[in-house]
Structure formats: C-alpha cells, structure tokens
Image: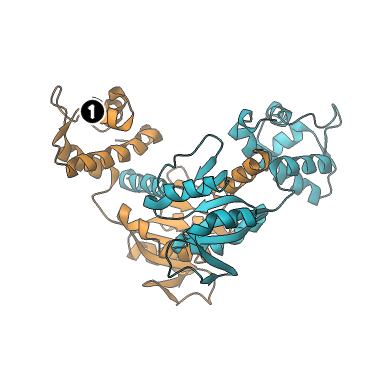
Chain colours: A cyan, B orange
C-alpha cells in the first residue's frame, strides 16, 4: 500500500469511522452495514465502501461489517494500535503549553523530549521533561525513537530546526511557526497557522455589519 | 459590499498583497503593476485584478498601483487600520498560553478579558488580565467592546460557551475545542483542530515505510 495514493479526505473519514464504530461497540452493537454507518455520519454507503476499499476487503455482502473486526483493522491502518514518541522544539509560551497538553495521549502520543536553543531554559524541567539543547536533537531523536516532531519556534528559526529534524530521520512535523517549511517529498508537514485564522476573523469582524 | 460574495481565497490573498506592498514600501518603491506584484507572489496579474475588483477600482491602466494608496485601502478593507478586542474562554493549559501569546498584537488584537468556569481560577491574574467567571461574559463583552472570542475549553462545554458568546453579540469565534460548533449563519468560526493534524501525522508515521 502506498500512502500517496490515499486521498486526504479518506484518511480523515477513516478516523470518523473508527470513532463511530467505538460508539456502536459501547452500546453492544455487533454489526453495521455501510448504509447504516453512512446514515450516522451523513455519508453515502458508496463513499464508505470506496474509502475502505483502499485498504482491502471488509465485511460480507448482506451481513455488513463485524464491528470489532473493522475497528481493529482501522486501528492498525491508522497507527492507533501503537504508541508514538514525539518531541517539541521551542519551549516558549506555546511550547510550554504543548508540553502539558493532555490531548496528546488521546492519540497515543507521548512527549519524550523537548528542545530549546536558549541556554537559560536548557536543563529546566517542565512537567517531567528536561529541556535539552537543540544540538542534541539528532542523538535524542534516535535514542528515544521519536517519530513526530512539533515545531513551536519563532518563524525565523523554524526552517533550520526542520532541517535538523529531517537530518535526524524525522518524517512527520506539526508546524506552529507561521512560515511554509521547505521539506523533501517524503516528509509530511501539518501546519497549524494561527495567523491565518486570526486574519480571517479580523476581516470578518470588519465587514460583518 | 457583502462579505458573503468574496471568496475565502481572495481574502487570504489580500493579506498576502498587503504584506508584499509593505515590503516594497520599505525599499522605497512607489508603484507596482499587477503583473509585477503577481510575479513576486507567483500569481497571475488577472488573479490580482480580479481579487481587488471585489472592492472597487484601484490603480490606473499603464501606471500600475500607487503602493501607499493600495496599502491604505487594503488595511481598511481587512480591518488592519483598527484595533480589535478579543476574549479567551477556558484558561487551562492552552488558554493560559494564549493569554501570553505575543502574536496577537501583530494582528492588532488585544486580549481584553479572560473567562473560566472554575471558581478556583476566577480572580487570579494571568499577565495583566483577571480571570472572570463565565457568567460575566455578556456584561464584559459589551462593556469592553469585544469583537472576537477564542474558545479554549474542553469539547463538552464549548457549545454552551459558544451560545453564551453569540447571545452576547459575538460574531467571530476561533475554536480550539475539538468539536464542530453549531452556530447561526451570521457567525464566523475558525476551527484550529489540533486533533485532526495529529491524526494525519499518526497515519503518516504508520504508513511511511
């Protein structure tokens, strides 16, 4: 299976399917048809079959999907059956907040390291994580088997940090710095651009009356 | 002018045009044609003329745009010529970080109030902002002329908070809670969904090899 061929929309919907299957499982429902699942999510049954079709053949015609089996299959596809170590680079206001963000563990993500270039911060402990100097990115990413990095640095250092992370083997980056990172094709960047959202709201506030 | 008719892409590009005009202004350039501006931003001159056309007629054929004039016009359209008061609801990890977020003032946004439902937090000062009880949303939004609200509560209280804000006259919401808010048509919500970004990265980490 090549991830490049799976559309972004399909990936997002697989997470929706998984959440809904968990809801059904909690109320002891054992099987669900694509049209029932579609109705609950306001999607067509054809859409659901198409999305699942990227990953193989699930369910039996007429009987629908076995909820436990499909749940397990989706957890495996989506990486929800494992834990992932992440690191945070840039421990300013935002980075500190992220170090204490309780939402990570809902996604089986564990903050295993934090880095900052400011030597006054290095050595301090936030939560139970010691802030390390950015020179140690390579050795720690490797020794702690970190798969996902979060960049929470200012814009002017984000690209250098991204380069260091990529050289260290990181292929998944969540970027809070308000710049477009230049990365190789095999690296996935998810931008969380607060500026963009704030600009849209300011425009709307100015033009709403 | 009706904001509903202006496409989202146009609004985003207007902010790009404004940034680029400021860059040109700094190096003392006085006029720019749509094709020169387009070249700098990797956009066609027709696109630029079309985007600006939503807001009137700018520039003179042959002479291009007067940079100072277009800059001022865009600042006015985008609400960058005024300051906007914002409030933050939910002063947990994320809300606290946002209270100290230095990026707001780059957008002429000023945190004028903070609210939390936890009475242990109410009355505490973060930065120079006193945390108020959520029962005071209506009176404070009105007395401090707050235009934009940021919801940083857990998912299960976000809709109630949104309802309170909307009743208080708020029409622009930045939502960090991982739920889709149900709001009237005249209310603009910008979702910043960290879960969605994290899920995509987990999928990618799991399928990259």
| Disc 1 crowd, CA 10 A, few/some/many (<14, 14-19, 20+) | some
In the rendered view, does A81 fall on the left or right side of B113? right
Exactly how many numbered labels are in the figure? Answer: 1
Considering depth in this image, is B103 or B170 the residue closer to the camera?
B103
Q: Quadrant of residue A35?
A: top right
* Residue B191 visible here: no
- Above or below for B138 versus B46: below
- Above or below for B98 versus A35: below
Q: Position of residue A7 (x, y in %)?
A: 60, 31
Q: Position of residue A87 (x, y in %)?
A: 57, 56
Q: Secondary structure at mark 1?
A: helix
Q: Position of residue B167 (x, y in %)?
A: 45, 56
Considering depth in this image, is B54 or A77 the residue closer to the camera?
A77
**Which of the image's four quarters has the N terminus of chain B?**
top left
- Above or below for A118 versus A68: below
Q: Disc 1: which chain? A: B
* Residue A138 visible here: yes
**Which of the image's four quarters has the C terminus of chain B?**
top right
Q: Quadrant of residue A29?
A: top right
In the rendered view, does A177 fall on the left or right side of A110? left
The residue at 28%/32% (across/down) is B40
Q: Quadrant of residue B41?
A: top left
- Above or below for A88 versus A125: above
Considering depth in this image, is A122 or B205 the residue closer to the camera?
A122
* Residue wearing tag 1: B36
Q: Position of residue A2 (x, y in %)?
A: 66, 30
The residue at 39%/66% (across/down) is B113
The residue at 45%/77% (across/down) is B123
In the rendered view, does B90 fall on the left or right side of B2? right
The residue at 58%/46% (across/down) is A169
In the rendered view, does B27 fall on the left or right side of B192? left
């Amino acid at each position: 299976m090549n991830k490049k061929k799976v559309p972004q929309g399909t990936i997002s919907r697989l997470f929706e399917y998984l959440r809904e299957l968990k809801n059904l499982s909690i109320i002891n429902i054992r099987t669900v048809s694509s049209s029932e699942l579609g109705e609950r999510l306001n999607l067509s049954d054809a859409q659901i079959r198409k999305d699942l079709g990227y990953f193989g053949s699930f369910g039996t015609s007429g009987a629908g999907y076995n909820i436990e089996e499909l749940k397990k299959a989706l957890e495996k596809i989506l990486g929800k059956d494992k834990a992932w170590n992440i690191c945070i680079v840039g421990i300013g206001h935002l980075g500190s907040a992220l170090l204490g963000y309780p939402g990570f563990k809902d996604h089986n993500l564990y903050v295993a390291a934090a880095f900052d270039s400011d030597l006054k911060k290095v050595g301090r402990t936030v939560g139970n994580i010691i802030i390390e100097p950015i020179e140690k990115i390579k050795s720690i990413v490797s020794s702690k088997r970190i798969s996902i990095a979060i960049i929470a640095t200012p814009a002017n250092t984000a690209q250098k940090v991204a380069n260091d992370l990529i050289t260290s083997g990181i292929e998944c980056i969540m970027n809070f710095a308000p710049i477009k990172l230049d990365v190789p094709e095999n690296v996935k960047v998810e931008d969380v651009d607060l500026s963009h959202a704030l600009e849209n709201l300011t425009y709307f506030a100015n033009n709403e009356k």
